[in-house]
Amino acid sequence: MSIHLTSLIDPERGSSSRRLAWLASDTDGFPVGSAFLRLFTTPGQKHYAEMDLHVHPSERRHGTGTLLLDAAAHAAREDGRRSLVAQAEPGSPGAQFLRARGFGQAATFTFTRLNLGDTNRSALTAIVEQAHPGYRLSRWDGTVPDNLADTFALSRRAMDDMPMGGTDYGTVDWDVDRVRAVAAAVARRGDVLHTVVAVDEADGSIAGFTELVVSGDGTGGGQHYGTGVLPEHRGHGLGRWMKAAAILQARDCHPDLGCLRTDTADGNLPMRAINDALGYSPTHQVIHYKLDLSPR
């Protein structure tokens, strides 16, 4: 079977990345597969690219996936990338495909879920009300208030040393414009962004944060975006404190919300311990596979 690839470009360039795409069609012009390549544009990630590749189950084993992968890998190399990362569930056809084509297992992420109806409000309240000398909680919805914008952007470096296995993920460069752009993107989708932070009372700076996104109608499942504590403020239980406050806020603001979801690298032992203690249960795993694109 002859396969034709059509190269596409996403017209909406993001603030931190751009996307390329390829559509695979058979001899009759029917789509049989696709590949999307995300090229990060911030300085700390210009070496890194992510690929999302799919082939219709009935069209597999005809070389379509290989053609799509070759196109994406060539484009990533031409753009100066040294790492190409793709995701697949353990034991899936996608995992077998990636391993057979030279991708190595870089990191495993476990997805977990907290059913809000099963949470113990009294226990969560006790965690939130526990004193953390030198710190206080603050929160907002949507865009960060102007008086906290600078320190919130600086606090994002708490994610720089987040365990990511061997993915070669790099670091994300944050400034106030990027923080506000993320909040604006969530709002354009019609979703609600809730943020809880721990504030250092000595100077009013943000020591840590946790973010939660909920659909505009307050139903379904909320998604944790990120939780981080700056290195100099770790060891005080701030992560558990903030996340418990976010759970209570979700219950109070969205009584019809069914659950909260998050994913954590298996190597991120502190965050896994927090999630376990708060009652999150595993649902499935996803493996990040990496292909080395460095010149040999």
Image (cartoon, rainbow, N blue to C red):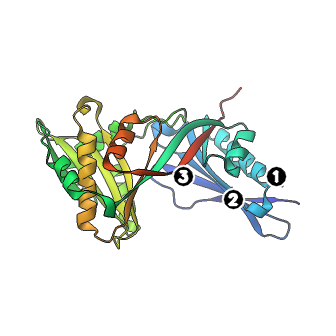
- Residue 37 visible somewhere in the drawing: yes
Q: How far apart are marks 3 and 1 (CA)?
A: 27 Å
Q: Which of marks 1 and 2 is nearer the N terminus?
A: 2
Q: Which of marks 3 and 2 is nearer the N terminus?
A: 3
Q: Residue at the spot x=83%, y=59% of the render?
A: 3
Q: Give the image location of residue 90, x and y in percent.
A: 62, 46
- Residue 149 visible somewhere in the drawing: no
Q: In which quarter of the image is residue 143?
A: bottom left
Of the pair 125 and 142, the residue shown nearer to us: 125
* Kind of element beneath mark 1: loop
| 267 lies left or right of 218 | right
> In the image, which is nearer the foreground, mark 3 or mark 1?
1
Q: Earlier in the sequence, mark 3 or mark 1?
A: 3
| 15 lies left or right of 142 | right
Q: How far apart are marks 3 and 2 (CA)?
A: 17 Å
Q: Mark 2 points at which residue?
A: 34
> In the image, which is nearer the foreground, mark 3 or mark 2?
2
Q: Mark 1 points at which residue?
A: 63
Q: Mark 3 points at which residue?
A: 18
Q: In which quarter of the image is residue 216?
A: bottom left
Q: What residue type is labelled 3?
A: Arg
Mark 2, Cα crowd under 10 Å, few <14 / some 14-19 / many 20+, is many
Q: Give the image location of residue 91, x and y in percent.
A: 66, 47
Of the pair 38 and 213, the residue shown nearer to us: 213
Q: Which amino acid does label 1 sit on?
A: Gly
Mark 1, Cα crowd under 10 Å, few <14 / some 14-19 / many 20+, is some
